[in-house]
């Protein structure tokens, strides 16, 4: 690809599936680079919950045998491709590219290993559109964390904010420090909160009402704040394994009501966020931004900050938007993963491209 960096005009579908299993986000974005500045417009966006059989398989994919895992990688890719094709037809759009995050099943950067399920080849075959996927593997191979990947979008698309905070399955933050973008995961959020609220049959704690009805348990809170992850130096990231092997066993070692567990988890999240923000204007996005109780506890624990909630579309689709942006950068041979964020040997262009080879 010999495209000029100063001549960029591309329309990309970004596809995001979060670790909290909230559902599938699809976002169609028009990117233009002019006068040393990136501009974007979300032209269509949708979110839909997973059907039960897909959700169950995603939740247990890490327990599958090799054959079942490989088969589901293709089946899930076909499912994604069909949903994206329906999205394209519904909105009468013509994307130049699809950028799919996939769904993270394994993430162990310490042994240079990460895996996001959802075959890019199957997405391309179903949609007839060139597809980029597997954005994390190159960075992990280069001794990076492979996460978070969103900060490069924060840097170029949301430069007016001092900090960009995302409250998804995990909370992560990015900001400029000494002329470099710095970013890291802060703590589990929806992955942990949703795990416990599902005991009631609900998918999430709407507005944080159940957490609000509980009491903060001081000894559990102290134990959570002493988890070794919080003493690690950046860059650092969290994965499903950390929640299942560390956080859940710790929380369950205390004989508490669901309400008290959720209240204490929210307080823990808010404290850890407050510890990592010195002050200034903070853009807050992700599903956790709708948790009113958590938002109140954040403001209480970080009074030095102005937490800014953007429009609902940006809150809901920021990650899908930025994965579309990562795809655009990939298409133009521009690094889309920053070593200053992940700790990799150098900036890199993450992704694997599956081409249609169609005759226009």
Image (tube, rainbow, N blue to C red):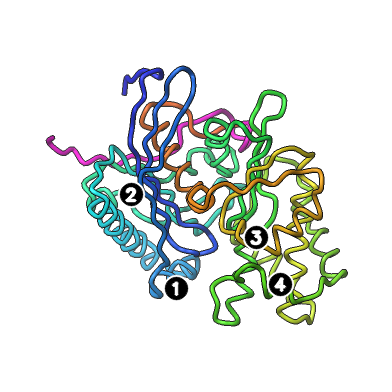
Quadrant of the image containing the N terminus: top left
Give residue 56's mark.
1
Percent across and percent down for residue 35 are: 46, 17
Give residue 120's mark.
2
Contact? badges 4 and 2 (CB < 8 Å): no
Query: Quarter of the image holding residue 161?
Result: top right
Q: Which residue is mark 3?
A: 189
Q: Is residue 222 above or below residue 111?
A: below
Circle 4 or circle 1, nearest the eye: 4
Lower position in the chain sequence, tag 4 or tag 3: 3
Give residue 211's mark.
4
Contact? badges 2 and 3 (CB < 8 Å): no
Crowd around label 3: few <14 · some 14–19 · many ≥20 (10 Å): many
Q: CA distance from mark 4 to mark 1?
A: 25 Å
SS for dot 1:
helix
Q: CA distance from mark 4 to mark 3?
A: 13 Å
Lower position in the chain sequence, tag 2 or tag 3: 2
The residue segment tinted magenta is 340-360
């Amino acid at each position: 690809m010999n495209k000029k960096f100063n001549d960029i005009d591309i329309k990309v579908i970004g596809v995001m599936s979060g670790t909290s299993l909230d559902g599938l986000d699809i976002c169609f974005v028009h990117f233009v680079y002019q006068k040393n500045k990136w501009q974007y417009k979300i032209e269509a966006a949708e979110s839909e919950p997973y059907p039960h059989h897909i959700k169950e398989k995603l939740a247990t994919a890490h327990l599958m045998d090799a054959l079942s895992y490989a088969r589901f990688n293709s089946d899930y890719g076909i499912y994604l491709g069909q949903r994206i094709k329906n999205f394209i037809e519904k909105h009468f759009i013509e994307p130049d590219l699809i950028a799919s995050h996939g769904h993270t099943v394994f993430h162990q950067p310490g042994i240079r290993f990460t895996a996001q399920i959802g075959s890019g080849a199957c997405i391309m075959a179903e949609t007839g559109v060139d597809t980029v996927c597997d954005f994390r593997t190159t960075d992990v191979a280069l001794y990076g964390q492979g996460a978070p990947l969103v900060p490069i979008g924060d840097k170029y698309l949301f430069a007016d904010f001092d900090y960009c905070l995302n409250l998804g399955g995990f909370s992560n933050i990015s900001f400029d420090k000494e002329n470099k973008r710095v970013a890291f995961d802060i703590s589990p959020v929806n992955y942990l909160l949703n795990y416990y609220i599902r005991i009631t049959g609900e998918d999430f704690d709407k507005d944080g009402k159940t957490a609000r009805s509980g009491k903060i348990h001081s000894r559990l809170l102290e134990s959570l704040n002493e988890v070794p992850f919080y003493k690690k130096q950046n860059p650092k990231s969290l994965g499903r394994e950390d929640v299942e092997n560390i956080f859940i066993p710790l929380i369950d070692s205390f004989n508490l009501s669901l309400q008290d567990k959720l209240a204490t988890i929210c307080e823990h999240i808010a404290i850890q966020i407050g510890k990592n923000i010195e002050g200034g204007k903070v853009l807050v996005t992700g599903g956790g931004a709708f948790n009113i109780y958590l938002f109140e506890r954040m403001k209480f624990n970080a009074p030095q900050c102005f937490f800014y909630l953007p429009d609902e579309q940006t809150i809901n689709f920021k990650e899908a938007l930025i994965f579309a942006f990562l795809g655009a950068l990939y298409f133009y041979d521009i690094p889309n993963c920053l070593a200053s964020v992940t700790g990799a040997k150098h900036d890199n262009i993450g992704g694997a491209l599956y081409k249609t080879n169609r005759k226009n």
